[in-house]
Amino acid sequence: MDTQQIISELESERDRLEQAISALRGSMNGRRGIAAVGGGRRGRRHLSAAAKKRISEMMKKRWAERKRAAKAA
């Protein structure tokens, strides 16, 4: 094998390794950025007053139906 060919192959392998390392570093930086901002968790969802009222009414209706069903049984 020619020395120049060996050098060429080693340089191409070095380039592939550098690309792989930079890709891994980029993914680590992305994760670190997410963790720094929100700790990797989703924040709590906030409901509007109308949504809370609608859910409350639905749950009251549901529990009333269960209570009626329990009395009938």
Image (cartoon, rainbow, N blue to C red):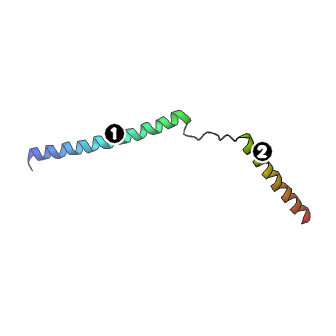
Looking at the picture, tell me which residue is in the foreground, 67 or 6.
67
The location of residue 25, given as percent across then percent down, is 38, 38
Residue lying furthest bottom in this view? 73
**Residue tagged 2:** 53
Horizontal placement of 71 versus 44: left or right?
right
Q: What amino acid is found at the position of numbered circle 1 in the picture?
A: Ser
Measured as percent of width and height from the top left, residue 63 is found at 83, 55
- Most distant residue in the left direction: 2
In the image, residue 68 sits, relative to residue 49, either above or below, namely below
Q: Nearer the viewer, residue 4 or 69?
A: 69
Q: Which mark is residue 22?
A: 1
Query: Dot 1: within a 10 Å radius of its alpha carbon, few (fewer than 14), some, or many (20 or more) residues?
Result: few
**Disc 1 versus disc 2: nearer the observer:** 2
Identify the mark nearer the N-term, 1 or 2.
Answer: 1
Looking at this view, name the residue that lies furthest to the top.
36
Marks 1 and 2 sit apart, C-alpha to C-alpha, by 51 Å
Q: Residue at x 51, y 36 (%)?
A: 35
Q: Give the residue at x 75% y 48%.
A: 55
Image x and y of residue 11, in percent: 19, 42
Helix, strand or loop at disc 2? helix
The answer to whether 24 appears left or right of 9 in the picture is right
Q: In which quarter of the image is residue 38?
A: top right
Foreground pick, 47 / 23: 47
What count of labels does the image hold?
Answer: 2
Name the quadrant of the C terminus.
Answer: bottom right
Q: Which amino acid does label 2 sit on?
A: Lys
Q: What crowding class fits label 2: few (fewer than 14 Cα within 10 Å), some (14-19), or many (20 or more)?
A: few
Q: Is mark 1 on a helix, strand or loop?
A: helix
